[in-house]
Amino acid sequence: MGRGGAGTVVIAENIPLLRNHQKESDGDHIKRTGTVNTAVAHIITAVIGSGVLSLAWSVAQLGWIAGPTAILFFAAVTLVNTRLLADCYRSPDPEYGHIRNLSYMSAVKQTLGEKSLWFCAFFQHTVIYIDNCKKFHL
């Protein structure tokens, strides 16, 4: 059960898309013990990572106006992407969905279909390959 707007109680069984489904994916995985603090730590290490080492130089090259503007722009892009991925975690409903998408590819498959999965996987693996070629000077 969850709380809806204006103090109303929303029951997952009353949502038409979810009425006939059980949360079969909830019992299939180990119990998660993350907290808000561990989530913030993971987000900081993923978003900032080693890019923070070149951040001061990049902002200095852009100047006092364009540098902070670029930082705010990329922060907004990161925020939008985070919200979109969080809404895709459970399908078909972000709060009461019975399917848990554990990876980006499973969210693409569930939301956009099999054809889009192959298209997205091709580009994702191409980017990984190019990144590794640059990293190892191939």
Image: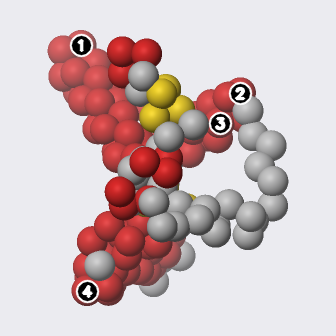
Q: Position of residue 30 (x, y in %)?
A: 81, 61
Disc nearer the start of the sequence (1/2): 2
| Mark whose residue sits in front, 4 or 2 | 4
The part of the image, by quadrant, that contains residue 23 is: bottom right
Question: Which residue in the structure is indicated by mark 4?
Answer: 115
| Mark whose residue sits in front, 4 or 3 | 4
| Mark whose residue sits in front, 4 or 1 | 4
Disc nearer the start of the sequence (4/3): 3
Q: Nearer the viewer, residue 7 or 101?
A: 7
Decide: few, some or many residues near mark 3? Use Cα within 10 Å; few <14, some 14-19, many ≥20. few
**How far separated are the C-alphas under marks 4 and 3?**
32 Å
Tag 4 near tag 3, CB within 8 Å: no
Tag 2 near tag 3, CB within 8 Å: yes
**How far separated are the C-alphas under marks 4 and 2?**
38 Å
Decide: few, some or many residues near mark 2? Use Cα within 10 Å; few <14, some 14-19, many ≥20. few
Residue found at x 46% / y 34%: 10
Apparent side of residue 4 relative to residue 26 in the rendered image (left or right)? left
Disc nearer the start of the sequence (3/1): 3
Decide: few, some or many residues near mark 1? Use Cα within 10 Å; few <14, some 14-19, many ≥20. few
Which residue type carries mark 4?
Answer: Lys
Residue 85 makes an appearance in the image: no
**How far separated are the C-alphas under marks 1 and 2?**
32 Å
- Secondary element type, mark 3: helix
Apparent side of residue 39 relative to residue 9 in the rendered image (left or right)? right
| Mark whose residue sits in front, 3 or 1 | 3
Which residue type carries mark 2?
Answer: Asn
Question: Which residue in the structure is indicated by mark 3?
Answer: 39
Q: Position of residue 87 (x, y in %)?
A: 40, 47
Compared with residue 11, is residue 9 higher up or lower down, i.e. above or below? above
Residue found at x 31% / y 38%: 80
Apparent side of residue 60 relative to residue 131 in the rendered image (left or right)? left
Compared with residue 108, is residue 94 higher up or lower down, i.e. above or below? above
